[in-house]
Image (tube, rainbow, N blue to C red):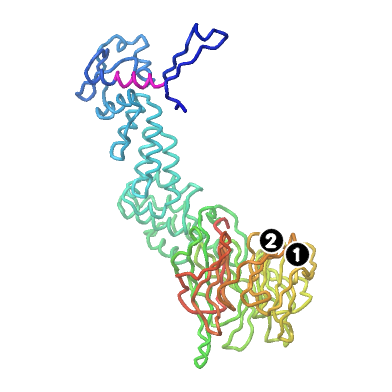
């Protein structure tokens, strides 16, 4: 079979007899001609123009340059003086870059190197070698890194290169915390810094990242920059900052009245938000679009040391979930009033909500509810539950938080009561009670309904049912398509299904679709765990900590939907705990 570049001899079409005419087609001829012309150029044979640049003389053929460059075509085909000259002088350009472009005109090959790409781009833009300049932009875009992104951004501004300008700007906004530690960042003008801080695409983990960047920038030349403090601080969403950062800002303000006013306004907003009021505005709106990774948060937990009694954990830890892998554990602000157990943990948006629990110090159930804001790393107390309870479940559904069932030291029987939190009133309101009172049930929100799975009844036996609340119609029903036999199953919402671990057998894992009423069996988990944290992100489910054979463990098992397999992770949680609360804050929350 002949290749596309093979020379071909064919009879001419259109009814001409085969012996009368032949078509000779030589696709490779043009390449051979250019190669020959390039050899002639190197020997200065048949050349008709000399390009002079930076003291060097480059012999060329006008037709080749004109066919390769709009600049040269306009020069040689217009009524300008250069069209008649044998020597053309180019000023302010790099001789190496011009020679490389002339070589490209003949060979269609050019090397783009990191050391010379900017010089080559500038020259190719001036001489209008559009393919080369476009490739230079693609090369610089691929090379965008923390140390060079601001440099490339300024370079793009200088040459009005829209593509590189946008790419470098996006890189700066997406990696602001790291970029703000570079020397180029400290050389930005106040106007340039304000432009970055004002951009809605700015991606940060916390507003404190911006505060620290501003302070670094000002302290780099404090006498000349301190008067910009107010202007820059106006771009920070101060109401989302921890109180300690606000105090730090006051200390840095040099008794600046405008700064003090901004901080006072922020404190006012924080007070209103903590009381449950909805304060609208840019300064109180989280930059929720910034996170590209899900966040796993672990809250509290405890273990029984038998002779020593219970050991409680006040720790709140988190890690990023990067492509299905758990990152390093980092600490958040400790859980307030942590010496209790059997509380319930759920998440709503950026917030983690801890409700109820059993306070061993006073030997009673508690009604207090605490909310942790991941953005500001702060705990705030919400309105108390109507019924003090422990061993209950909680879940988020349709942007509402529900608490379900449990036990109370004020009642002998299990609780059938259900409550939903109303944030604007900062209070819990009663919902229709469950048909069957249960404690230690798994509670899951799925497809706009609330499911209460298993649990213990008043006889401390497995309830063996799934109860379903339709909040829109305030109606409870019993799910008959899926049987749960065990008292303390674990469950979560996973891709429009409810995955139940330990529904009928200790290690059995079942996925139930409420819409189709279908069940499917997944691989058994590695070990029988009770009271572990169970969370999911994308294609994976994790079981963290819990009791195995009656003892608290710090191990982690992971289920991968793509392989339908469980594996024990090398990583562990810092302490062996059970009844630890676990939630995932999704990147798009």
Quadrant that contains the C terminus:
bottom right
Q: Is residue 495 above or below residue 46?
A: below
The image position of residue 21, as x and y in percent, is 48, 8
Q: Residue 552 versus residue 205: which sits nearer the camera?
A: 552
Q: Which residue is drawn at 67% across and 60% down?
A: 496
Residue lying farthest top? 20
In this rendering, would 387 be left or right of 382?
Answer: right
Q: Residue 124 carries which label?
A: none
Question: In this rendering, would 134 be left or right of 357?
Answer: left
Q: Residue at x 41, y 55 (%)?
A: 177
Q: How crowded is mark 2: few (under 14 residues within 10 Å), some or many (20 or more)?
A: few
Foreground: 482 or 85? 482
Name the quadrant containing residue 110.
top left
The image quarter containing residue 574 is: bottom left
* Residue identified by numbered label 1: 471
Q: Nearer the viewer, residue 131 or 517?
A: 517
Q: Main secondary structure of the magenta part?
A: helix
Q: Is mark 2 on a helix, strand or loop?
A: loop
Image point 43% across, 55% down: which residue? 210
Q: Where is residue 380 in the image (x, y as percent from the top left)?
A: 56, 70
**Where in the figure is residue 243, as x and y percent of width and height?**
47, 66
Query: Does the magenta portion include 69?
Result: no
Task: Compute the Cα span from label 1 to label 2.
Answer: 9 Å
Numbered mark located on residue 398 in the image: 2
The reply to whether discs 1 and 2 touch (Cβ–Cβ < 8 Å) is: yes
Is residue 293 at all visible to an observer of this figure? Answer: yes
Residues shaded magenta: 27-37
Q: Is residue 519 left or right of residue 338?
A: right
Element under disc 1? loop
- Residue 307 lies, with reference to residue 11, above or below; the image says below
């Amino acid at each position: 079979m002949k290749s596309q570049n093979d020379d071909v001899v064919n009879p001419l079409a259109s009814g001409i007899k085969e012996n009368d005419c032949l078509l000779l087609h030589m696709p490779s001829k043009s390449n051979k001609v250019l190669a020959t012309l390039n050899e002639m150029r190197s020997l200065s044979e048949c050349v008709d123009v000399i390009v002079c640049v930076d003291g060097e003389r480059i012999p060329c053929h006008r037709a080749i340059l004109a066919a390769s460059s709009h600049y040269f075509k306009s020069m040689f085909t217009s009524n300008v003086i250069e069209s008649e000259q044998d020597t053309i002088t180019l000023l302010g350009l790099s001789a190496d870059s011009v020679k490389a472009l002339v070589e490209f005109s003949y060979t269609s090959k050019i090397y783009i190197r990191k050391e010379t790409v900017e010089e080559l781009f500038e020259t190719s833009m001036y001489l209008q070698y559009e393919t080369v300049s476009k490739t230079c932009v693609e090369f610089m875009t691929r090379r965008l890194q923390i140390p060079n992104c601001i440099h490339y951004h300024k370079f793009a501004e200088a040459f009005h290169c829209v593509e590189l300008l946008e790419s470098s700007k996006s890189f700066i906004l997406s990696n602001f915390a790291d970029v703000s530690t570079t020397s180029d960042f400290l050389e930005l003008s106040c106007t340039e810094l304000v432009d970055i801080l004002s951009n809605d695409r700015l991606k940060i983990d916390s507003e404190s990242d911006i505060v620290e960047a501003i302070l670094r920038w000002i302290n780099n030349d404090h006498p000349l920059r301190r008067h910009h403090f107010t202007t820059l601080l106006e771009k920070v969403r101060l109401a989302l900052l921890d109180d300690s950062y606000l105090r730090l800002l006051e200390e840095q303000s040099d008794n600046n009245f405008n700064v003090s006013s901004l901080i006072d306004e922020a404190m006012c907003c924080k007070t209103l938000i903590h009381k449950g009021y909805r304060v609208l505005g840019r300064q109180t709106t989280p930059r929720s679009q910034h996170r590209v990774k899900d966040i796993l948060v672990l809250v509290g937990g405890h273990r029984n040391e038998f002779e020593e009694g219970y050991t409680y954990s006040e720790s709140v830890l988190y890690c990023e979930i990067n492509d299905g892998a758990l990152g390093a554990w980092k600490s958040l602000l400790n859980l307030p009033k942590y010496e209790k157990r059997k509380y319930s943990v759920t998440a709503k948006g950026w917030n983690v909500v801890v409700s109820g629990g059993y306070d061993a110090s006073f030997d009673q159930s508690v009604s207090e509810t605490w909310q942790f804001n991941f953005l500001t790393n702060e705990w705030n107390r919400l309105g108390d539950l109507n019924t003090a309870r422990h061993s209950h479940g909680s879940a988020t559904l349709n942007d509402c938080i529900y608490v379900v069932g449990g036990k109370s030291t004020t009642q002998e029987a299990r609780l059938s009561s259900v409550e939903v939190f109303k944030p604007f009133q900062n209070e819990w309101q009663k919902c229709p009670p469950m048909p069957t009172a249960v404690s230690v049930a798994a509670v899951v929100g799925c497809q706009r309904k609330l499911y209460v799975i298993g649990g213990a009844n008043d006889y401390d036996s497995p309830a063996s049912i799934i109860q379903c609340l339709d909040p829109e119609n305030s109606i409870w029903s019993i799910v008959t398509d899926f049987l749960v036999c065990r008292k303390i199953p674990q469950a979560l919402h996973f891709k429009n299904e409810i995955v139940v671990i330990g529904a009928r057998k200790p290690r059995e894992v079942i996925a139930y679709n409420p819409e189709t009423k279908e069940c499917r069996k997944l691989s058994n988990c590695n070990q029988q765990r009770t009271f572990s944290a169970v969370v999911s992100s994308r294609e994976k489910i994790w079981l963290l900590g819990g009791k195995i054979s009656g003892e608290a463990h710090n191990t982690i098992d992971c289920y991968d939907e793509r392989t339908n397999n469980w594996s024990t992770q090398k990583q562990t949680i810092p302490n062996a705990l059970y009844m630890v609360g676990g939630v995932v804050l999704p990147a798009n929350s």
